[in-house]
Image: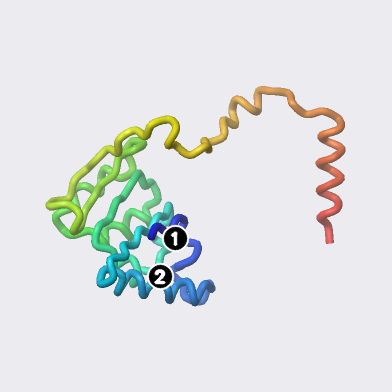
Amino acid sequence: MVCEEAHRYIPRDPHDGFGPTRKAIARIAKEGRKYGVSLGLVTQRPSELAETILSQCNTLFALRMGNQQDQEFVERALPESAAGMLSCLPSLRTQEAVVVGEGVRVPIRIRFANLEENKRPHSTTADFAHSWLEDSTSRETISRSIERWRKQQR
């Protein structure tokens, strides 16, 4: 089971809501292995995850991470043998990760293989710089945008 954006529904602070979800995921993290269920927590903000649930995960894939708070959080989860690898977290390239835990014999730095074009998600990062160069606003678009904006007022 893969939980994308895991920090949104298993937050560090139990008062942030999602109680039933948090309870279910905690149970899967603690007992899932007995039933052949694996749990993958995917997040860009590991410092916002519930530590008790994250501590149940046996293998950690850490991708590029610039936020100091997130790096410190990951450092607490890593074994001492992987401490030297933390310095490379901010400089990892796309598709690279540091992997530690039961899934690997020793902490390693890996690069994920390219996916075939037809297996890739049909989404990309918006090219804002290119879009800003285009003059695509018409009077009609501006009028419609202002009208929608006004209707949203209380």
The residue labelled by disc 1 is 6
Element type at mark 1: helix
Residue beneath disc 2: 25
Please report contact status of discs 2 and 1: CB closer than 8 Å, yes or no.
yes
- In the picture, the quarter occupied by the N terminus is bottom left
Q: Is residue 99 left or right of residue 144?
A: left
Question: Residue drawn 86% across and 32% down?
Answer: 140
- Look at label 1 and name its amino acid: Ala
Q: Residue at x 17, y 50 (%)?
A: 107
Quarter containing the C terminus: bottom right
Q: Nearer the viewer, residue 109 or 24?
A: 24
Q: Nearer the viewer, residue 84 or 118?
A: 118
- Taking the image as shown, residue 117 lies to the left or right of residue 92, namely right
- x, y percent for residue 70: 37, 56
CA separation, marks 2 and 1? 10 Å
Decide: few, some or many residues near mark 1? Use Cα within 10 Å; few <14, some 14-19, many ≥20.
many
Residue at the image position 20 percent from the left and 54 percent from the top:
103
Q: Amino acid at mark 2?
A: Ile
Q: Position of residue 29 (x, y in %)?
A: 33, 69
Q: Which mark lies nearer to you, 2 or 1?
A: 2
